[in-house]
Amino acid sequence: MERIIMDVDPGIDDSLAIIFALFSPELMIEGLTVVSGNIEVEQATINALKAVEMSGKEVKVYKGEALPLEKNYIDATDTHGEDGIGGNFFTKPNLNYESKHAIDFILSKISTHPNEITILALGPLTNIAKAIQKDPETMRKVKRIVLMGGSALFHGNCSPVAEYNFWVDPHAAKIVFASEIEIMMVGLDVTHHIIFTPHLREIVRQLKTPLSNYIYDITQFYVDFHWKQERTIGCVINDPLAVGVLIDPDLVQTVPAFVDIETDGIAIGQSVVDFYGKRNHGKCNTQVCMQVNPKAFFQLFLHRLFPDFQK
Ligand code: BDR
Ligand code: CA
């Protein structure tokens, strides 16, 4: 079992990822840390607690940073709805977050379990970068970071070249890639193939459980957004793929590369992926996911969330 800290900004696809992870016995979720991204951190923390409540599992939630390191904060309520989870404005969860700050939780967990903790980062990297700034020695003992963010050969989704999580806090992303912690980048190159189609959504709707209703409801806004934005039918669910990769690494094929992040100008937030060793003397800092098996992913994802959906 792999010990995981999940850093999230729920977010529709983060909410799906949280439930997927909590339903996966291969992963020991040590805690959820929350950061501003899709929605500001107060509401994102409520949304994380809601996802935990919907899962029926127990895991502690820690609120983290409200603002990016340097750049002005820009949320993604255009994509995720006014409340960050599809504009449903669900009743508040009956759970509370912990008083400890997310960064202190991350550092204390890593100190207790040196070289055993994987950070699964599904939002802007502000919490992780600040933990590195606060205590680089402890953060050297992170086992690895698996993150959803960036893009190598695919285009961006916030600018022609930048993916949202890196674009929101490019300075944080730069710190993380410079940290020498082992990184796996699950970027748009692979996640744009993970389309939750109307067919799959209908299967979920037909199950008519509280969890399936919740998933159907939170993804409606995402579906409408994808149609308006790019004429995609269905919605791309990025973050759950990073969970899937932790459970079954064969879902993707990776290529080693040196990755650095642009922090200024027209390409701000771009992940510059050097597959050819032109920079940094051929040294790689990242395994970049370049190919994915979407069918295998959805089989795993739906079976985990709804074990008896195929009778
Ligand atoms: C990423 O940005 C957010 O909107 C999603 O939750 C995902 O983490 C995709 O670019
Ligand atoms: Ca996210």
Image: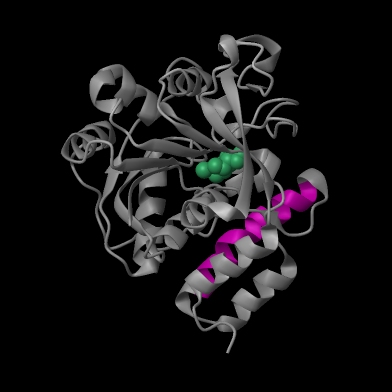
Instruction: Using the image as rendered, state which of residue 174 and residue 281 is in the foreground.
Output: 281
Residue 269 sits in which quadrant?
top right
Looking at the picture, does residue 35 appear above or below residue 132?
below
In the picture, residue 295 is in which quadrant? bottom right
Magenta stretch, main secondary structure class: helix
Residue extending farthest to the right is: 231
Q: Residue at position x 65%, y 77% from top? A: 203
Residue 74 can be seen in this image: no
Residue under the point 55% across and 23% down: 284
Q: Which residues are magenta?
A: 212-228
Res 228 visible: yes
Which quarter of the figure is the C terminus placed in?
A: bottom right
Q: How many marks?
A: 0
Q: Is residue 215 inside the magenta stretch?
A: yes
Q: Is residue 136 above or below residue 201?
A: above
Residue drawn at (56%, 70%) of the image: 302
- From the top left corner, tell me how far across and down residue 56 is, in percent: 33, 70
Nearest the eye: 143 or 223: 143
Residue 94, magenta (yes or no): no
